[in-house]
Image: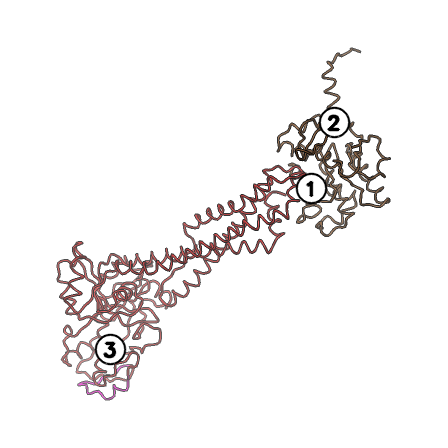
Amino acid sequence: MNIFSLNRKQIKAKPLSSLLNIFLFATGVAIISFLFLTTEKIESQLSSNVAGIDLVVGAKGSPLQLILAGIYHIDHPTGNIQYKEALELTKNPLIKQAVPLALGDSYRGFRIIGTDQTYPDLYHGQLKEGMLWKTDFETNIGFKVAEKTGLKISDSFTGVHGFIEDAGHAHDEHEYIVTGIFEETGTVLDQLILTNIASVWKIHEHHHEHHDEKHMESEGAHVTEAEETHDHEHEHTDKSGHVHTDGHEHEHGYDHGHNAGEEHGHTQENDEEITMLLVKYTNPMGAITLPRLVNSSTNMQAASPALEINRLYSLMGVGIRTIRLIAGFIMAISAFSIFISLLNSLKERKYELALIRSMGGSRSKVFSLVILEGISIAFIGYLVGLALSRLGMLLVSYYTENNYHYNLQQWFNINDGYFLFVSLVIGLLSALIPAIKAMHTDISKTLSE
Amino acid sequence: MRTILIPVSEILCIKMNNKALITRNLIFSYTRSVTFGFPDIDCEPGNHCIITGPSGCGKTTFLHLIAGLLKPDSGEVIVQGTDTVRLYSSEADRFRGKNIGIIYQKPHFIQWLTAFENLQIARYLNNLATENEDINHLLRSLNLQGKAKSKPSQMSQGELQRLSIARAVINKPALILADEPTSSLDDKNCEEALNLLKRQAEELQASLVIATHDKRLLDHFSNRIFL
């Protein structure tokens, strides 16, 4: 028998009241802990993915949407920009580096990005196996993509148009092939499929050829019957029923677009579009002049990731502050509840306490018993609250993982220790006054009643 | 044979140390207007005494003063040579736990502990071994072994009374104080309870001090103190 076993029996003797107090306390701890976990994780994800990008140039529209699509690969891009115009912009001496992005397709929910080989460097991407993509339709995939899809080097796959799994129509004509897999970076790179821009052009150009004739350009409603009524100079055949009758042999897909382009009189550069440009400044002057330059004198829009993210924080911030207030309020109520229930129980327990004193228990022993009760309720509440917050995180993370491929799961946090300390202090404070009262029980009077 | 000379003061000291209980000039006031003065007690070890008088005359108060649960305005309470009045609060608590066993008018127990655990806690609070055959032995001798794992709410009045006696003697005290131990009992049970008390006291060679207005007990005790 020791003070802890006594304490345990004491708490079990009042199951309902103890449970209520524990649960109340746990709720407060759970909410605050959950908030801390999510905001911390979100903030770290947001900042690590900015990767030193100073500016994002894309089609006019919502700047936040541009940032979300171009850096975080959430949400749809605002549209496309002319490749030629973008190229002109990069000649500006204030631009140190400009990485082009061509978006539009995905594979099993993972986005396919047409870009150049400097993109992986932004996120310190290291190849685990394979090589960087070189020719058209070669791809490098991120860690998470490999994990979820099971793709390996030399596997091939076809993309679908749009970003929703299985919803867009498949670009069956062109298959991608995996030539490299990246190490895990903890950034957005893990969930991307990279290829060169030309591949993306070729896929969509092929489609645009087919659709010039029929002009049926609605998302996901591409009409494949149109292929029958083409008056191409050459007929094409591939796996989906086209007949290739070019004058030259060519491997499926690779030369096709190029030759078709020439023969159809397309010039690659004039009409080609990309989705956006990721820009790094040569010096801070860029922040002052470039955005204004782009926004007012071109058809494009420039958005600063830092600015937009701060705006997002301030929008989020109001909500978070409110929730924090509510959680703090709940914790205050639970501390008060522990206090009141301890105080009330004193009335019932005064015989016990007087008895303990009369049996030889000192005042400090009685004091410790009451204090320990308060602390243990707070401690148990803390543990339960922590478990609840992890559960909450699991659910949220499952959702974000499935929809946005962002993993918010976090099991441990430095703040946990801080919460423990605060919980124990609250337990102690709630029990303090009842404990002092218990110390001053009038033994004689109580035991003569 | 040599004669050893001992100073008178030392003789007195030795004599006092040998006594189970001595009280001298005890005065206690509940409020400024209500004051009690109590007669002196002189009780040899192994001897018993009875404090008697009508209700409201201060028997319980007297007992609580002897137990150290109340501090007198003036006077001495010397148990086995120690003046308990002079002890600090925690020392007094400890002393009481080890040397004085108390049986209350109403059986008070910790409701969320079993009979066994209620005895255990009496030992725990005095830093005595709690895993001990003594507890079981005591329960057996008071015919309570069947109720060892029961909570007080599951025990009868008679059982609770016997448990009170058990708790009073578990730490082998020199002094056993009992407040109206037989008042609510019929003659037969009164006789039994008294014999139980006496037997336990004898086993420990402890002194019994009973505060009661029950006339049936008067005949059993020679050392009578009237309030």
> Which image quarter holds the C terminus of chain A?
top right
| Residue numbers of the magenta segment | A223-238
Residue at mark 3 to residue at mark 1: CA–CA distance? 99 Å
Residue that badge 2 annotates: B22
Q: Amino acid at mark 3?
A: His
Tag 3's secondary structure? loop
- Tell me if mark 1 has few (under 14), some (14-19) or many (20+) residues whose alpha carbon lies within 10 angstroms of its own: many
Q: How far is disc 2 from disc 3 in space, using C-alphas? A: 116 Å
Q: Amino acid at mark 2?
A: Ile
Which is more toward the observer, A233 or B204?
B204
Q: Which mark is residue A447?
A: 1
Reply yes or no: does residue A138 show up in magenta.
Answer: no
Is residue B96 or residue B200 the one in the foreground? B96
Q: Is residue A413 above or below residue A73?
A: above
| Crowd tier of the residue under label 2, counting other residues whose Cα lies within 10 Å: few below 14, some 14–19, many 20 or above | many
In the image, the chain rendered in brown is B
- Would you name the residue on which mark 3 appears? A252
Which SS does the magenta portion mostly show? Answer: loop
Query: Label 1 amino acid?
Result: Leu
Q: Position of residue B90 (x, y in %)?
A: 62, 33
Q: Chain of mark 3?
A: A
Alpha carbon separation for disc pair 1 and 2:
24 Å
Q: Residue at x 32, y 62 (%)?
A: A190
Decide: few, some or many residues near mark 3? Use Cα within 10 Å; few <14, some 14-19, many ≥20: some
Residue extending furthest top? B2
Q: Can you say whether A244 is above or below B180 in the image?
A: below
Chain A: drawing colour: red
Identify the coloring: by chain
